[in-house]
Amino acid sequence: MLGHDGRHPAARAHPADRATHLLNAMNTSATPSIVSWHAHIYFESSTRDAAWALRERILAEIGERLDMGRFHERPVGPHPQWSYQVAFAPAQLGTIIEWLTLHRGHLDVFFHPNTGDALADHRDRAAWLGHSYPLNLLALGAPI
């Protein structure tokens, strides 16, 4: 129903209320829960030693807050670069991002949540420190 000014009531609402209304309308499915986070530290042959040194420093300084994954000197899964994984609880996200931001040097870091939808987590919910790289999303079941 249009008001006396010819506008729909939602159009007369405060801009923040209109934004909330639009976001609520866009979110028609349940919001997933984040179970954990992964940070993948990317490297190549020329940065291998720096990546190993960062790994050792992570373990020494904040290792009690995370689980360290294997050191892959080849692309694995959707990751196009050599990498290793750092897994951690959602409550540690701020601490881990801050620490890696200050200590990663020239290494690139790919972050993603784990919600049970690996494709969306890697494609739609991810962030980078440093350079970003196209992922091999076919490895996660993306359509061709």
Image (cartoon, rainbow, N blue to C red):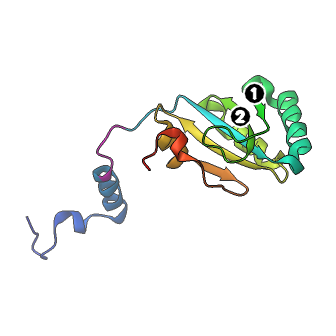
Query: Which residue is drawn at the image coordinates 31% and 61% (left, top)?
Result: 18
Q: Looking at the image, is 35 positioned above or below residue 80?
A: above
Query: Which residue is drawn at the image coordinates 85% and 31% (left, top)?
Result: 61
Q: Amino acid at mark 2?
A: Gln
Neighbour tally class for label 1: few under 14, some 14-19, many 20 plus, Cα within 10 Å: some
- Judge by depth and name the residue closer to the eye, 131 or 73: 73
**Picture coordinates of residue 9 (x, y %)?**
18, 64
Res. 68 image quadrant: top right
**Picture coordinates of residue 139 (x, y %)?**
54, 40
Report helix, strand or loop for mark 2. strand
Disc on the earlier residue, 2 or 1 = 1
Q: Looking at the image, is 15 positioned above or below residue 114?
A: below
> Would you say 82 lies left or right of 119 here?
right
Query: Which residue is drawn at the image coordinates 62% and 38% (left, top)?
Result: 77
Residue under label 1, please give it.
68
Q: Amino acid at mark 1?
A: Met
> Would you say 11 lies left or right of 23 here?
left
**Picture coordinates of residue 51 (x, y %)?**
85, 42
**Picture coordinates of residue 144 (x, y %)?**
44, 50
- Judge by depth and name the residue closer to the eye, 57 or 83: 83
Query: Which residue is drawn at the image coordinates 92% and 42% (left, top)?
Result: 49
> Would you say 23 lies left or right of 109 here?
left
User: Is disc 2 in contact with disc 1, using a CB cutoff of under 8 Å?
Assistant: yes
In whole angstroms, how far apart are the C-alphas of marks 2 and 1? Answer: 6 Å
Report helix, strand or loop for mark 1. strand
Residue under label 2, please give it.
85
Provide the residue span drawn in magenta.
26-30
- Quick check: is 140 in the magenta stretch? no
